[in-house]
C-alpha cells in the first residue's frame, strides 16, 4: 500500500508531456482566425492537388496519343524514303549498264582484237566509271565482271569479295540489289545489272558496292531529332544500320512484327538496359524491320515539366489564399475582440471604458467601417493585379516580337537549306525539286523544257596547281559569270563538285544551244584573279544540253551523254542531244 502514491506520481509524470503536446496541437484550433485560415488553406491545397493530378493525367494521355501517332508516321516516312533510295540505286546501276560508253567499250574488251584497242577501251571505260563514282559518293566501288565471276575492271576502293559471291553477282539476269555483306570497316550492299548490247549479246555485268554509311542520312528524321533513333534490323533481330549520332545497338529485344501487322508503340527495356518507347514495322524489300526508339524520359519530359510548373503555380496559389484568409480573419475578429475586451473590462469593474464608435455608436457602423477598410485593401490588391496585368501584356508583346524574329530566322534558315554555301547558287536538293515541278508543268502545258549540264574543264588540275582556295574562287566567279547571261526564268544550281545544272523553262533545242553557247563564251572570256597567281587565269567549260521528251531518266541520260561528248571532243564546247528521228 505504501507504493500506491509513488505509482500515481510516476503516472502523472508520464502523462504530463503528452498533455502539453496535445495542448500545443489544439491551441491553433481554439482561435477563430486560425480555424478560418486552416480551413481555407486545406481547401485550396486539396483543390490544387486535384487539379494537378487531373491536369498531368490529361497531359500524359494526350502525349501518349501523340507518340502513338508520331512513331508509326515516322516509320512510314522512313520506309518510303528508304524504298525510294534503294529504287534509285537500282535505277542508277541499270542506267550505267545501258549507257553507250559502257556497252561499246565492254564489247571491245570482249572481242578478240588487238591489245592496243582493248587497252583504249579499258582506259575509256575506266574514265567513265571514275566520273560516275565521283558524282555518286554513296558508291564505294564499281566492278565489271565477266560471266565466270572474274574481275575485268574496278574503280574505287579495293574491297575483296569472296569468289562465290563474285560468281553469283556475275550471273544476274536483270538489275537487282543484293543483301548486306560484312567487309573490313563496315558493311556493303551490291547493286548489279547485266551489260547487253543492242543485239541481245551479253557482255558481262556491272556492279556497284554501296557503303552502309550511305544509308544513315536516309534514316534521319527531323521530327525525331537527336533524341530519337531509327534502326534497321535483319530477320534475326541483329542491327544492320542506325541513324547517325546514336549509340551502337547490337540487336532488337522484342519479337519482330509479322508482315502487314499493325504498328504498335510499346515501352520496353533495350538491349543496352535503357527504358525506351519504341515501335517497329516490316520493310518488305529485303525482309528487314525498321525500328524507331526514343528514351522514355525524353519522350515524356514535357509531362515532368508541366507537373513541376503546375505544382509551383498551385503552391503559390495556396500561399496567396492562406495570406488572404489570415487578413480576412483578422478583419472579422478585430471588432468582435474589441467589443469582447470592452465587455470584459466592464465586467471586471472598470467604468471608464471607452470604445471608439462612429456617430451612430452602434455595432453595425463598426462592421461597416471594418468592411470599408477591407474594401480599401481590396482596391490596393486590385491595383497590384492591374500592374501585374500590364507587366504580363508587356511580356506578351516581347514574346510576339521574339516570335516574329524567330520567324525571320526560320525564313533565313529555309533559304540557306536550298542554297549552296560556296557559290550562293541553288543546291542539288532545290534543283531536283524544281526540275520535278517543271517537268510536271511541261507535261501539262506542252511547253518545251531544257536541261543543261555544265562542267568546268581541267578543274582538278587547277586545284592541284594553285590550291583549293583558288578552286573555290573559280567556282564562285564562274557562277557569277554564268548568272550574268541567264534569264529570270532560268534556274542555275550547283549539281556537285565543279558541275552545274541549269533548268531552262520554255526553251527548245535551238534555244538550249544558244543559251549554252552564251554560258560557254561568258566563262571563256572572263579573267579570274587568283591569290598568289601573277596573271589572271582563264577557265573553260564543257556543256551538254537536252530537251525534255516526257521521260525524266531519258532527259538526264541525254544531257549526260551530251556533256560526255563535249568532254570527248576536246572540251570548251557545247553538245546538244539531238532529237530522235521519227
Image (spheres, helix red, strand yellow):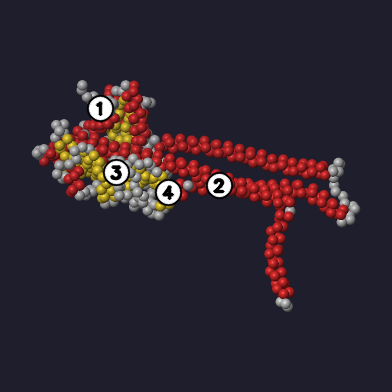
Q: Is residue 366 left or right of residue 295?
A: right
| Residue at 19 percent of width and 44 percent of height | 168
Check disc 4 and report the residue beneath it.
267
User: Sequence order check: which comes first, mark 1 or mark 2?
Assistant: 2
User: Sequence order check: which comes first, mark 1 or mark 3?
Assistant: 3
User: Sequence order check: which comes first, mark 3 or mark 4?
Assistant: 4
Residue 395 placement: quadrant: top right
- Residue with the most extreme front position: 1
| Residue at 40 percent of width and 43 percent of height | 264
Residue 418 placement: quadrant: top left
Check disc 3 and report the residue beneath it.
287
Label ID, residue 201: none
Which quarter of the rendering shows the C terminus? top left
Number of residues whose C-alpha sits closer than 10 Å to that of mark 4, classed few (under 14), some (14–19) or many (20 or more): some
Residue 95, percent from left and from top: 24, 35
Residue 546, percent from left and from top: 27, 27
Does the image show residue 33?
yes
User: Sequence order check: which comes first, mark 2 or mark 4?
Assistant: 2
Check disc 2 and report the residue beneath it.
53
Q: Is residue 361 left or right of residue 170?
A: right
| Residue at 15 percent of width and 33 percent of height | 200
Check disc 1 and report the residue beneath it.
576
Judged by depth in the image, the label closer to the viewer, 1 or 3, is 3
Q: In what element is the residue under mark 1?
A: strand
User: Sequence order check: which comes first, mark 4 or mark 1?
Assistant: 4
Residue 378, percent from left and from top: 71, 42
Give the alpha-carbon distance from disc 2 to disc 3, as whole Å. Answer: 45 Å
Amino acid at each position: 500500500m505504501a507504493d500506491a502514491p509513488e505509482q500515481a506520481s510516476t503516472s502523472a509524470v508520464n502523462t504530463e508531456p503528452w498533455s502539453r503536446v496535445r495542448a500545443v496541437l489544439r491551441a491553433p484550433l481554439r482561435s477563430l482566425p486560425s480555424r478560418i485560415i486552416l480551413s481555407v488553406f486545406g481547401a485550396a491545397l486539396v483543390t490544387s492537388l486535384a487539379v494537378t493530378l487531373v491536369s498531368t493525367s490529361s497531359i500524359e494521355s494526350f502525349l501518349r496519343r501523340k507518340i502513338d501517332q508520331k512513331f508509326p508516321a515516322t516509320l512510314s516516312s522512313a520506309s518510303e524514303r528508304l524504298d525510294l533510295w534503294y529504287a534509285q540505286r537500282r535505277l542508277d546501276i541499270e542506267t550505267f549498264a545501258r549507257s553507250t560508253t559502257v556497252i561499246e567499250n565492254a564489247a571491245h574488251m570482249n572481242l578478240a582484237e588487238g591489245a592496243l584497242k582493248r587497252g583504249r577501251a579499258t582506259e575509256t571505260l575506266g574514265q567513265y566509271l571514275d566520273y560516275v563514282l565521283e558524282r555518286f559518293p554513296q558508291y564505294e566501288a564499281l566492278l565489271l565482271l565477266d560471266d565466270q565471276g572474274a574481275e575485268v575492271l574496278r574503280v574505287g576502293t579495293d574491297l575483296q569479295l569472296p569468289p562465290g559471291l563474285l560468281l553469283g553477282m556475275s550471273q544476274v539476269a536483270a538489275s537487282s540489289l543484293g543483301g548486306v555483306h560484312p567487309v573490313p570497316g563496315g558493311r556493303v550492299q551490291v547493286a548489279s545489272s547485266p551489260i547487253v548490247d543492242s543485239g541481245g549479246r551479253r557482255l558481262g555485268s556491272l556492279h556497284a558496292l554501296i557503303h552502309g554509311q550511305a544509308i544513315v542520312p536516309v534514316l534521319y528524321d527531323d521530327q525525331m531529332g537527336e533524341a530519337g533513333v531509327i534502326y534497321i534490323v535483319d530477320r534475326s533481330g541483329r542491327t544492320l544500320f542506325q541513324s547517325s549520332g546514336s549509340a551502337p545497338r547490337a540487336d532488337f529485344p522484342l519479337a519482330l512484327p509479322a508482315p502487314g501487322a499493325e504498328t504498335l508503340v510499346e515501352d520496353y527495356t533495350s538491349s543496352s538496359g535503357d527504358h525506351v518507347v519504341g515501335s517497329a514495322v516490316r520493310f518488305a524489300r529485303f525482309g528487314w524491320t525498321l525500328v524507331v526508339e526514343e528514351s522514355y524520359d525524353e519522350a515524356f519530359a514535357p509531362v515532368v515539366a508541366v507537373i513541376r510548373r503546375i505544382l509551383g503555380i498551385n503552391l503559390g496559389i495556396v500561399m496567396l489564399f492562406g495570406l488572404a484568409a489570415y487578413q480576412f480573419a483578422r478583419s472579422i475578429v478585430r471588432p468582435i475582440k474589441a467589443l469582447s475586451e470592452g465587455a470584459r473590462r466592464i465586467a471586471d469593474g472598470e467604468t471608464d471604458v471607452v470604445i471608439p464608435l462612429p456617430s451612430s455608436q452602434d455595432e453595425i457602423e463598426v462592421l461597416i467601417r471594418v468592411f470599408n477598410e477591407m474594401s480599401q485593401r481590396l482596391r490596393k490588391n486590385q491595383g497590384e493585379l492591374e500592374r501585374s496585368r500590364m507587366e504580363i501584356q508587356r511580356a506578351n508583346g516581347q514574346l510576339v516580337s521574339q516570335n516574329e524574329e524567330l520567324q525571320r530566322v526560320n525564313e533565313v534558315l529555309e533559304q540557306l537549306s536550298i542554297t549552296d554555301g560556296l557559290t550562293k547558287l541553288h543546291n542539288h536538293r532545290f534543283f531536283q525539286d524544281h526540275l520535278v515541278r517543271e517537268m510536271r508543268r511541261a507535261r501539262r502545258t506542252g511547253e518545251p523544257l531544257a536541261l543543261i549540264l555544265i562542267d568546268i574543264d581541267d578543274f582538278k588540275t587547277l586545284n592541284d596547281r594553285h590550291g583549293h582556295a583558288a578552286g573555290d574562287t573559280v567556282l564562285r566567279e564562274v557562277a557569277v559569270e554564268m548568272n550574268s547571261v541567264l534569264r529570270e526564268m532560268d534556274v542555275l544550281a550547283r549539281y556537285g563538285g565543279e558541275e552545274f545544272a541549269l533548268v531552262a523553262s520554255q526553251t527548245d533545242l535551238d534555244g538550249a544551244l544558244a543559251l549554252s553557247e552564251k554560258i560557254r563564251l561568258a566563262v571563256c572570256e572572263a579573267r579570274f584573279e587568283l591569290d598568289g597567281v601573277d596573271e589572271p587565269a582563264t577557265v573553260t567549260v564543257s556543256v551538254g544540253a537536252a530537251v525534255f521528251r516526257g521521260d525524266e531518266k531519258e532527259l538526264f541520260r541525254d544531257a549526260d551523254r551530251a556533256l560526255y561528248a563535249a568532254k570527248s571532243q576536246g572540251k570548251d564546247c557545247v553538245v546538244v542531244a539531238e532529237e530522235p528521228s521519227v
